[in-house]
Image (spheres, rainbow, N blue to C red):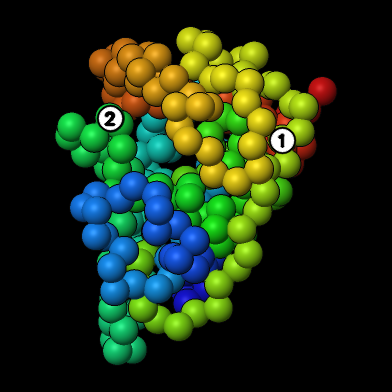
Amino acid sequence: MEDLAKKLGADIFGVADLDLVRDYPTIPNNLLEGFKRGIVIGVKLSDAVFDSLPASRPLYAKQYEVANATLDRIAFILANEIEKRGYKAIPIPASKILKNTNWRSFISHKAIARAAGVGWIGKSLLLVTEKYGPRIRLATILTDMPLEAGEPMKNKCGSCRECIEACIVKALKDSNFEDYPKREEVFDVEKCAKKLQEFAADPDIGYMVCGICVKVCPYGLKKSGGES
């Protein structure tokens, strides 16, 4: 599956043991029933776009749209191939906020990715990878295909506060954790969502994107050459 995913354009591929995330919220509550593995795929976003924020936010919004569509296409093809091999598979959309869910979707792609060993959950509550930092988008395929799973990664942010200091609405809390924290302990989702709705209402942007916490993460900066 990894070779096919990479051929289709994925930059990131990992497999999670779903037993590690069964306590996390899903919509519906029984979404994971009958599935043993979560395949996570990711695509990298443009360093130049992030490094030019906030001026480049309209460009980031378009790239966000294209990345999500790309991931959905890859996930659809992978799920179809898995079914052709006699197993079950459900592709989960890269980005889909559901109504009356307090800004949640079907499942946390970040939780799956962390369990797969793709990266860790940073103080920004984003997935941070060694290679790309948080400059990525993710999607998931749930399956019963007996794939070898990776090992979860613990938080590597240490004493860094770059995302906390840079947040334009001060929605991030300076918290310490190793695994996957409770969202309310790390992040004021309402503060963030209110600002993202303002950006979505801007005709030049049109999506709930900000990107500042992504921009300043040292892991992404080191790889993009944007670090001073």
Which residue reaches farthest top?
Answer: 169
User: Dot 2 lies on which element?
Assistant: loop
> Which quarter of the rendering shows the C terminus?
top right
Residue 79, percent from left and from top: 32, 72
Residue 55 visible from this viewpoint: no
Cα–Cα gap, marks 2 and 1: 27 Å
- Residue drawn 52% across the image and 55% down it: 113
- Tell which of 146 and 183 is nearer to you: 183
Is 169 rendered above or below residue 17?
A: above
Which residue reaches farthest front?
Answer: 23
Q: Which quadrant of the view contains residue 166? A: top right
* Three-letter residue code for mark 2: Asn
Which residue reaches farthest right?
Answer: 228
- Residue drawn 50% across the image and 65% down it: 16
- Tell which of 174 and 94 is nearer to you: 174
Q: How many residues crowd around disc 2 within 10 Å: few (fewer than 14), some, or many (20 or more)? A: few
Looking at the rendered structure, which numbered label has been put on residue 102?
Answer: 2
Q: How many marks?
A: 2
Residue 5 visible from this viewpoint: yes
Specify whether 152 is left or right of 93: right
Residue 19, percent from left and from top: 45, 66
Q: Which quadrant of the view contains residue 76? A: bottom left
Looking at the rendered structure, which numbered label has been put on residue 157?
Answer: 1
Is 32 rendered above or below residue 172?
A: below
Which residue reaches farthest bottom?
Answer: 86
